[in-house]
Amino acid sequence: MLEVITQRLSEKNARLVAVSKTHPPERIMPLYLKGQRIFGENRVQELQQKYEVLPKDIEWHLIGHLQTNKVKFIAPYISLVHSVDSLDLLKEINKQALKNNRVIDCLLQFHIATEETKFGLSEQEASDILHNPAFSEMKNIRVCGVMGMATFTDDQSLIRSEFRHLKSIFDSLKNGFFENSPWFREVSMGMSGDWEIALEEGSTLVRIGSLLFGHRN
Ligand SMILES: *Cc1c(COP(=O)(O)O)cnc(C)c1O
C-alpha cells in the first residue's frame, strides 16, 4: 500500500504523512525501513515516547489539537504543527521555538466540515491573526499553509466541495499575505477515505493512517 500511495503522490508533487497514532514503534519501523520519513501523531505524550525510541531522522508532524501548555515538550524537534487554531498558540510556539533557537513550521487549521465538533479557524479568524501586529513580530514561527478535515460522510461531492473550499482559502491567503513567501505552499488535506479526492483538489500533504496500519482500536 505504501508504494502505491507514494507513487500516486509523487506524480502530483505531494507528500505522505503516515499517521501512526495508537500504533507502537515496532509497527512504525517497517515503514521507516521502506523509506517513509514523515510520521504524524495527534497526542503529545504519545509522540514524545515514540520520538525517544525511534530514529532521529524521522520528521514528526503534530496533526491533532495542541494545548499551549504542551508546546514546550515538542518544541525541540517537531517538524510541522498542522493544527494551529489561535494566535495564543502561535505565540507559545514562537516562544518555545526561540528558547530552542529554531524556527517551527506551522499550518493554520480551518473548519471546513459541516460537523460541529471539528476544530479549526474561520476565514475571518485567520485574517484577524495574520493582520495582528503580534503576528509579524514572531520570528521563530513560519506559517507554511493550511490544513483541514472534510466531513465524515459517503457523499463524495460534499467532500470534494470542502476540499475545494480549503484550496480556495489557501489561494486567497497566498495572494493576500504570503505572495513573497515561497514556504507558504502546503495544503494538508486527505485521509484514508478521501485522499484521492484531496489530491485531485490540490493537496500537498495527505495524512493517512488506517490504510497503512489497519484499523485503530
Ligand atoms: C487520525 C487522523 C488522520 C488519519 O486518519 P485515517 O482515516 O486513519 O487515515 C488524519 N488526520 C487527522 C487530523 C487525524 O486525527
Image (spheres, grey):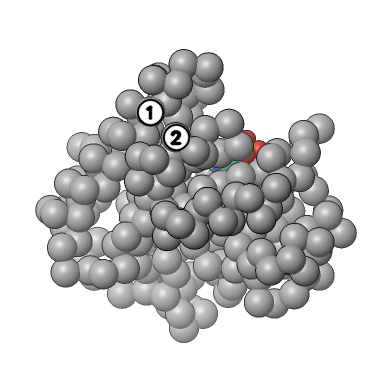
**Dot 1: few (<14), some (14–19), or many (≥20) neighbours within 10 Å?**
some
Q: What is the x, y in percent for residue 134?
A: 23, 62
Q: Is residue 178 left or right of residue 107?
A: left
Q: CA distance from mark 1 to mark 2?
A: 6 Å
Q: Residue tagged by mark 2?
A: 197
The image quadrant where one finds ligand 1 is top right
Whether tag 1 and tag 2 are in contact, CB under 8 A, the answer is yes
Q: Which residue is located at x 83 percent, y 54 percent?
A: 27
Q: Residue tagged by mark 1?
A: 160
Q: Is residue 213 left or right of residue 9?
A: right
Q: Determine whether the beta carbon of the residue marked 2 sits less than 8 angstroms from the nearest atom of ligand 1.
A: no
Sequence-first disc among 1 and 2: 1
Q: Is residue 201 left or right of residue 41?
A: left
Q: Which residue is located at x 56 percent, y 47 percent?
A: 207
Q: What is the x, y in percent for residue 122?
A: 29, 34
Q: What is the x, y in percent for residue 153?
A: 52, 18
- In the image, 166 versus 83, the foreground residue is 166
- In the image, 3 versus 35, the foreground residue is 3
Secondary element under disc 1, as helix, strand or loop, is helix
